[in-house]
Image (tube, rainbow, N blue to C red):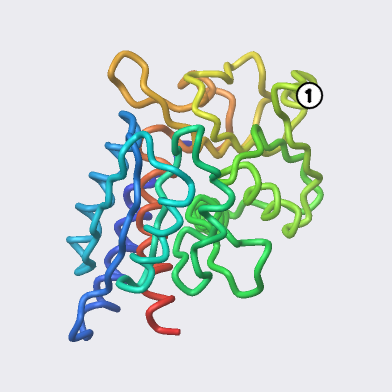
């Protein structure tokens, strides 16, 4: 079964619009980006459209490719004073210390939930929020299930592993160094978001597996996921790319922003 992320996202966004409507001042969100690639540009365009549609002002600050860590941190501190929420749109160039930049975002201005699992009361990260929404709607049970997380990035891997553990899953995080086809093919639930086109084929998963594909990359000018479409023949539940987790993450980000404004 394919997850209809667009329908779920619309329901969340409709509620966000209702929550924002009584406000005399539109919530302000600032996204900071640097040398955005194809996928990042697409994602930012979608964020702006969705934010505008629900009455949220989204301003994008694009920094030069040779920006330093100190300059990015100063930018974060400045826009945090002027905005209700700050989003650092990864990836950033190699010379920028990503962790130092993310630490500079105040938790009360962090709708991306980068401090989820670290700071009590932090927002669920939008990817985890999307996974949680899907799990609730499709009755996904995590407890005692073999869960494989592919990658250990700040956007997908780390927060998803924390979420799966809190839900009682038996979690393995696979990277280039410890990649195991055996563990992958034995997994009940797979979460991936590393941006490698069609990395996971039908031969690498078992019948009835549940797959959350949060990976996006360009393949011949088309946005694709980490999972090959034919995997849908074996999966009991699969989030397609596009149209799966992506739309929900944007809706969840905006819902997080409204929650922060209300605190």
Q: Measured from the top left, where is residue 178 in percent x and y?
A: 78, 24
User: Residue 155 sits in which quadrant?
Assistant: top right
Q: Looking at this view, is 186 or 199 the one in front?
A: 199
Q: What residue is shown with label 1?
A: 178
Q: Measured from the top left, where is residue 228 in percent x and y?
A: 49, 20
Say what secondary structure mark 1 lies in: loop
Above or below, 261 against 126 in this view is: below
Residue plotted at (70% across, 28% down): 175
Q: Looking at this view, is 120 or 188 the one in front?
A: 120
User: Residue 152 sits in which quadrant?
Assistant: top right
User: Pointer 1: residues within 10 angstroms few (<14), some, or many (20+)?
Assistant: few
Q: Measured from the top left, where is residue 173 in percent x and y?
A: 74, 36
In what quadrant of the picture does the C terminus appear? bottom left
User: Residue 177 sits in which quadrant?
Assistant: top right
Residue 80 lies left or right of residue 157; in this view the side is left
Above or below, 111 against 150 in this view is: below
Residue plotted at (33% across, 30% down): 37
Count every numbered label the image shows and give the total. Answer: 1
Residue 67 lies left or right of residue 150; in this view the side is left
Residue plotted at (42% across, 76% down): 259
Residue 138 lies left or right of residue 83; in this view the side is right
Residue plotted at (59% across, 55% down): 139
Residue 121 lies left or right of residue 63; in this view the side is right
Q: Looking at this view, is 156 or 115 the one in front?
A: 115
Q: Measured from the top left, where is residue 247 in percent x and y?
A: 35, 47
């Amino acid at each position: 079964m394919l997850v209809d992320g667009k329908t779920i996202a619309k329901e969340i966004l409709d509620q966000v619009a209702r929550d924002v409507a009584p406000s005399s001042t539109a919530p302000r969100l600032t996204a900071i980006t640097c040398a955005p690639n194809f996928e990042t540009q697409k994602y930012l365009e979608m964020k702006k459209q969705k934010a505008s549609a629900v009455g949220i002002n989204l301003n994008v600050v694009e920094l030069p490719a040779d920006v330093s860590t100190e300059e990015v941190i100063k930018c974060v501190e400045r826009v945090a004073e002027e905005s209700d929420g700050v989003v650092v749109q990864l990836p950033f160039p190699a010379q920028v210390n990503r962790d130092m930049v993310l630490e500079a975002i105040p938790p009360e201005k962090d709708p991306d939930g980068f401090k989820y699992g670290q700071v009590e009361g932090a927002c669920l990260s939008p990817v985890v929020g999307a996974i949680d929404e899907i799990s609730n709607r499709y009755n996904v049970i995590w407890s005692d299930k073999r869960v494989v997380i592919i990658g250990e990035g700040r956007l997908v891997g780390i927060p998803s592993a924390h979420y799966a553990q809190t839900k009682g899953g038996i979690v393995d995080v696979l990277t280039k160094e410890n990649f195991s086809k055996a563990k992958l093919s034995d997994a009940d639930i797979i979460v991936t978001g590393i941006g490698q086109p069609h990395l996971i084929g039908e031969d690498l998963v078992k019948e009835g597996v549940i797959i959350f594909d949060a990976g996006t990359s360009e393949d011949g000018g088309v946005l694709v996921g980490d999972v090959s479409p034919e995997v849908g023949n074996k999966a009991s539940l699969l989030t397609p790319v596009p149209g799966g987790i992506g739309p929900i993450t944007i809706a969840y980000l905006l819902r997080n922003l409204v929650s922060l404004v209300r605190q």
